[in-house]
Amino acid sequence: MSALRTAATALLLLAAPALAEPPRIIYSKSFPGSTPAFVLIELARDGSVVYKEAPDDDAPARFRLEQAEADEIFAAAEKAGKFARTLESGLKVANMGMKTLRWEEGAEKNEQKFNYTQDLDARAVHEWFERMTETEQLFFGLERTVQFDKLGVNHSLLLLEAAWDKRRLVAVDQFKPLLTRVVKNESYLHMARERAAKILDLFAQPPPQPPKAQAQP
């Protein structure tokens, strides 16, 4: 009896890491001809994100969402059945890129591919990942101009400010070192320095809420 208990305990201990493993959502989109043509984003339950633009990217971008944002995404994913049910609508619509949503939680692994879905909860999850992609494109653009094109910084800042006004930005803390660098360096245009300071002030305010996903015919 003791041996059986020992064996059972050992099995439970081996299974515990898998049972305790927090869920994560993996999103990818392949859309040749668009920018970026491919994206792979891994979202952990604590809001940490790994962002790649190639499957074999060995130096991915990393940032963190607010916990409330991560909570909203995972809640929508759970409402979407953790991607265990079919998401593709089957409707004849234009090619909008092949998307994949994958849920991983211990031994549970569900994955769905779709070009277009009518599932509002899946659309909400997809919209969050689109915002992450747009945010990183703006970050890369600002980073490039700050380092190599000082005259182009103001244009990058205009795009960033417009994205904030349209409620398209997430994880804005990653921008703050670049913005502070522009504000403090007189080698940048005065209008760029003023706009960078304005955006820093905007980022200090509560972020505007994104619009809810809407059903489309």
Image (spheres, rainbow, N blue to C red):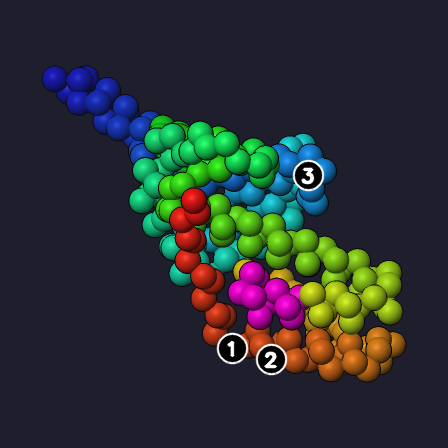
Which badge, 2 or 3, comes first in the chain's sequence? 3
Residue sitting at x 69%, y 35%: 32
Q: Amino acid at mark 2?
A: Asp
State the mark number for residue 37: 3
Do the numbered discs 2 and 3 sit on residues whose CB atoms are within 8 Å? no
Element at label 3: loop
State the mark number for residue 201: 2
Element at label 2: helix
Which badge, 1 or 3, comes first in the chain's sequence? 3
Question: Residue 39 occupies which quadrant of the picture?
Answer: top right
Q: Where is mark 1, residue-wise?
A: 205
Residue sitting at x 53%, y 65%: 167
Tell me which segment is drawn in magenta: 160-169
Q: Is residue 22 visible?
A: no
Q: Is residue 66 visible?
A: yes
Q: Amino acid at mark 3?
A: Ala
Quadrant for the N terminus, please.
top left
